[in-house]
Amino acid sequence: MKKASLLVFAVSALTVMMGLAVVWFIFVPVPTDDLLHMTGQIIAGGGWGGLGIGPLLNHHNEHRLILTRLAVLVDLVFFEGRQTLLIVLILSSALATAGLLS
């Protein structure tokens, strides 16, 4: 049982380290393709003011990206689009996953 616990912990730690490496080495402060259209609308309109809730609820392929779009919107408003919030959310979810697996 102890070996299985150690293996799960090692895999969890490796997952967290890989997530940190991806964030550190591959980070580019550019919205992903899914969010370029919404970001373009916000920039062209001079801000979120005239857009309403519509862009959050629009379909993308066959699904809606409401939570992702909200995270990007919060990042644009509070962190000037540097994806700071998105990185924190990714790292938090990796740590939570590692905690649940161990």
Image (cartoon, helix red, strand yellow):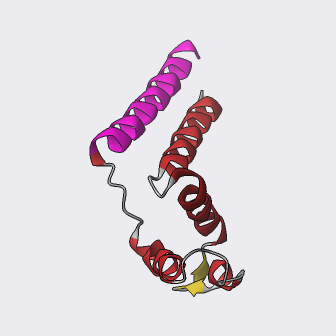
The quarter of the image holding the C terminus is top right
Q: What residue is drawn where x is 62% and y is 82%? A: 55
**Image quadrant where residue 53 sits:** bottom right
Q: What residue is drawn where x is 39% and y is 74%? A: 33
The quarter of the image holding the N terminus is top right
Seen from the viewer's position, the closer of residues 58 and 82 is 82
Magenta segment's dominant SS is helix
- Whether 92 is among the magenta residues is no
Q: Position of residue 35 (x, y in %)?
A: 48, 73
Tell me: residue 83, above or below residue 31. above
- Whether 24 is among the magenta residues is yes
Tell me: residue 90, above or below residue 38. above
Task: List the single residue furthest toward the front.
Answer: 46
Seen from the viewer's position, the closer of residues 58 and 74 is 74
Highlighted range, magenta: 1-25
Q: What residue is drawn where x is 54% and y is 83%? A: 45
**Image quadrant where residue 18 sits:** top left
